[in-house]
Image (cartoon, rainbow, N blue to C red):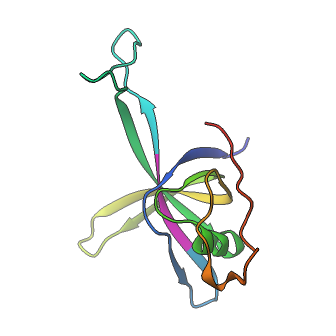
Amino acid sequence: MQNLVILAGNVGGTPETRTTQGGTRITHFSLATSRPKRDSNGKILRDDKNHRLEDTEWHRITCFNGVGKTVEQYVDKGMKVMVRGRIHYTRWTDSENIERYGVEIIADEVTFLTRAKSNENSGGGNEPEDDEIPF
C-alpha cells in the first residue's frame, strides 16, 4: 500500500523557506483546491448570475531541499501547480498542555501549470518550461 496524494490548485501565498540547524531547507506554501457545490440530487449549484458555486479547501504543502529550492525560486501567489506527494499527520502538546493535531502534504514533485515567476538571479534562460496541463 502507498500513501500518495495528487493535488492541482492555486498557490495561496508566497512560499516561505527556513533552514534547520542541520542544514535542511524546508519550504511551505498553501494550496487551494476547489470542487463544485452540489444539491442533495447531485446537481451543481449556481448563483443568481449562473456562476457555478464551489467549495474550496486549503492544503499546507511542505517541500524539502531541491524541490523546496525550486518552489522558493519560481513559485508565487496565484500560480497553478500540481503537487505529488504524501499526506503526513502530526500530533503535539502546546504550551497550555492541550493536545493538537495537524496535517500537511509532503511534496515529492511540484509541476508548474502556469508560467513560473521570473528569477532576477537566474542569469537568464534558466526558468523551467511552461508545462501547461489541463485540469
36 lies above or below 127: above
Please indicate whether residue 48 sits to the left or right of residue 24 in the image. left
Q: Position of residue 8 (x, y in %)?
A: 58, 45
Q: Nearer the viewer, residue 24 or 126?
A: 126
**Residue 92 in picture, x, y percent from top left:** 40, 66
Q: Is residue 29 magenta?
A: yes
| Coordinates of residue 85 in the picture (x, y in percent) | 66, 53
Q: What stretch is highlighted in magenta?
A: 27-32
**Between residues 16 and 77, which one lies in front from this camera angle?**
77
For this view, does 85 lie left or right of residue 101? right
Query: Residue placed at 63% from the left, 44% from the top?
Result: 6
Determine the image quadrant of residue 119: bottom right
| Residue 15 image point, x, y percent | 50, 70
Nearest to the observer: residue 109 or residue 3 = 109
Residue visible at 61% across and 36% down in the picture: 135
Q: Which of 25 and 130 is in front in this view?
A: 130
Name the residue at the bottom extreme. Answer: 21
Quadrant where the N terminus is found in the figure: top right
Dominant secondary-structure state across the stretch colored magenta: strand
Horizontally, residue 84 falls left or right of residue 34, namely right
Spot the residue most to the top: 41
